[in-house]
Image (tube, helix red, strand yellow):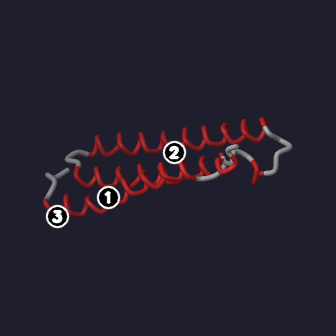
Amino acid sequence: MPETTPWLIWLSWPFLLAGIFFFLAGTVGLLRFPDVYSRLHAVTKADTLGLGLVVVGLSLRSDNLYSVGMMLLVWLLVMASGATACQLLARYQREAEPDTPPAERDNPADVS
């Protein structure tokens, strides 16, 4: 693979900044959303997209195909493990409180 050119570095910045934005949005969603299910959705979707954008940005800066392949492999493993972990956590939460309506589950506004 040829050496990284300055225009590829400039092209990578929007991907890196967008990835950072989605990481921050997922973190804010984790801290601010009212119930477990919306928190899990925020973390898995935003962080997976954020990592994908960071991988694209770093791949544009890479000098060899081996490192690009390794970054893509890590991203695929994170997608698979994140989806599996999210599904297991949601199932655990659903089994832990089967009779509670979704609007009342884990609502931080109801602190007494």
Q: Nearer the viewer, residue 78 or 86?
A: 86
Tag 3 residue? 7
**The residue tagged with tag 2: helix, strand or loop?**
helix
Mark 1 vs mark 2, CA separation in Å: 20 Å
The correct choice, above or below, for 83 with respect to 4 in the image is: above
Tag 2 residue? 79
The three-letter amino acid code for the residue at tag 1 is Leu
The correct choice, above or below, for 96 with respect to 49 in the image is: above
Residue 104: image location, x then y, percent: 76, 50
**The residue tagged with tag 1: helix, strand or loop?**
helix
Q: Give the residue at x 65% y 46%.
A: 36
Residue 3: image location, x then y, percent: 14, 52
- Give the mark, 1 or 2, whose residue is nearer the N terminus: 1
Verify CB contact (< 8 Å) between mark 3 and mark 1: no
Between marks 1 and 2 in the image, the one whose residue lies nearer the viewer: 1
Q: Give the residue at x 59% y 44%.
A: 83
**The residue tagged with tag 3: helix, strand or loop?**
helix
The three-letter amino acid code for the residue at tag 3 is Trp
Tag 1 residue? 17
Between marks 3 and 1 in the image, the one whose residue lies nearer the viewer: 1
Q: Dot 3: within a 10 Å radius of its alpha carbon, few (fewer than 14), some, or many (20 or more) residues?
A: few
Verify CB contact (< 8 Å) between mark 2 and mark 3: no
User: Residue 53 lies in what quarter of the image?
Assistant: bottom left
The three-letter amino acid code for the residue at tag 2 is Met
